[in-house]
Image: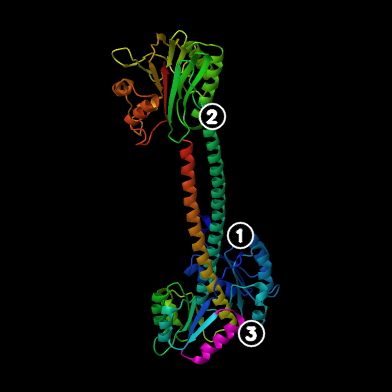
Amino acid sequence: MNPTTTRRPTILLVDDDEIVTKAIVNLLELETDYRTLAFQNPRTALESARRETIDCVISDFLMPDMDGLEFLREFATFAPDVPRILLTGYADKENAIAAINQVNLYQYLEKPWDNENLKIVLRNAVGQRTLEQQLSERLRELDLALTARDTLQHSAVEMERELALAQEVQQSILPRGLVDHGRFRFYHRYYPTGLLGGDYYDVATTGPNSFNAIVADVAGHGVPASLGTMLVKVMFWEASQRGQTSEGMLREMNRRLLHFMARHQYVTAFVLNVDGETSRVNGASAGGPHPVILSKTKLRRAHEWRLNGLPLGALEEKLYSTPDSQSITLEPGDRILMYTDGLLDTRIDEGESLDSKELLPTLDEISGLEGNELLDRLAKSRGIGSRALPDDVNLLLIDFD
Amino acid sequence: MTSEPTERAMPQVVMIIDDEPMVTQSIKNFLSLETDYEIIALTSPMAALETLKTRQVDVIISDYLMPDLNGIDFFLKAKEIQPQATRVLLTGYADKENAIKAINDVGLYQYIEKPWENEDLRLVLRNAIEKRQLLRRLEVKVAELDRASSDLKGLYSDLLKAFK
């Protein structure tokens, strides 16, 4: 972890008396694991010291060339954090003590020194230095961690703000409210999971009694899926303005989504062209869930409008075959239910989902209810509101009078 | 020696025990003059043990040769009551060997041979106290580091969730 903890501590020793240096070096080599650098000349010692990592320095006081205090002061200029120990003789003790504060000694030892005492003092000095180094390390680490945390917190706040904005934008993509149009009435429910998703539904009027409707799902979650819905919206509206047919719209969307979306992204959808004058509905599928027609006059009230179609943005144009489309005639009182496949998910871990035909019995039961009530009952039958949802759920009901 | 100013909420408390009142008085006087430590001077190791049960001290200096209880045995008991206090033994030349043998048992910070040098005593105390302060600060920083680390982990997982 920290290289200095495995390195042998290095003691720098300076005394002009060879007997002293030999004795101390022997003691330390025999009885400790310190590495000792011993010098009789303080100037040579200083030169060597600059090139080494020293953990403690011991110096004699009385030396011919340079006295111990001067040496230690010099040493302190380039290694201020290394503990300094002075060896004093009995005679010069007073002088030494008087000058001690000039150098800020860790401790002084009187000659003749006691071997045990010397070892203890060194142990404490080296230990102190290790402690100080550890503290510096921790302070540094703490600084880094706190800075990282603050940065992350800022980022988190920023991101929350951006996500909130993104959700606002996503909401604004969805129709604010669907106004009754001609002979048609619209009902809608949206059950969000609270995360950004890829659901999209819309109604675009194309005439006084006609409109296009779409329910789509961009694969995935989060920001990429959300961005996908914006693309789909723009294309839907633009194509609607041009009076494009359902399958024409899907073909165009496929071409453009191949261009604009990431490779792994795709969109499932179901599109309706509805003409109130002729009571005709033209539908086309891009692999979206099958809408359910609730018919007043037919014997079996609820039946699926099953069309085949490939998801958009997955296959290049030459492989993408024209989606199935079909025109049906509506009778007054007919109702079309479109929905995103979140309605079919059965469990939070998205392990299973229903086949859409399993919705039919419930829809039969509630097919006569008023629009809002129908949707509420449908949602309740799927446990929506009483369990966590794996995916957003959008329900769109179109009533034909 | 430390680059940061030492934080001191309370004065350091030093306890001195020596059966000779001259010794305790002399040390107390010297330290009161030269330092701002709070000094508790006692001549009975038994009384010292009682005091340790109620008052927290930072450093304990004790003589070795005392009638009721020798310094080493005293420190062994003191260590049980306040293990974190630093222990310094005053020894005579004769009983130094005993002191040395018991150093590791007792966990002595250092021993000082009589007659001691006041300056020496001052330095030893200063270093002992600084060591304890360093250890305390280290503890605090490690705890802060722990907290910051868990904050970080929490933040990371929150962020990841939003982008799943």
Residue at the image point whose x is 45% and y is 10% from the top: A322
Q: Which residues are magenta?
A: B18-37
Residue A224 percent coordinates (x, y): 51, 29
Is the residue under label 1 in contact with that under label 3 (CB below 8 Å)?
A: no
Examine the rendered structure and indicate whether residue B43 appears above or below residue A186: below
Residue A269 in sight here: no
Residue corresponding to mark 1: A52
Label 2, label 3: how far apart the Cα atoms are: 92 Å
Q: Residues within 10 Å of mark 2 (few under 14, many from 20)?
A: few
Dominant secondary structure (helix, strand or loop) of the stretch shown in magenta: helix
Instruction: Please determine whether, in this image, residue A286 is positioned above or below residue A226.
Output: above
Residue A102 versus residue A350 in the image, above or below = below
Q: Chain of mark 2?
A: A
Q: Earlier in the sequence, mark 2 or mark 3?
A: 3
Give the quadrant of the C terminus of chain A: top left
Question: Which label's residue is closer to the chain start, 2 or 1?
Answer: 1
Please give left or right for residue A31 compared with residue A375 in the image: right
Question: Residue shown at 43%/33% (left/top)?
Answer: A192
Q: Which mark is residue A172?
A: 2
Is residue B9 within the magenta segment? no
Q: Say whether disc 3 or disc 1 marks the residue closer to the N-terminus.
A: 1
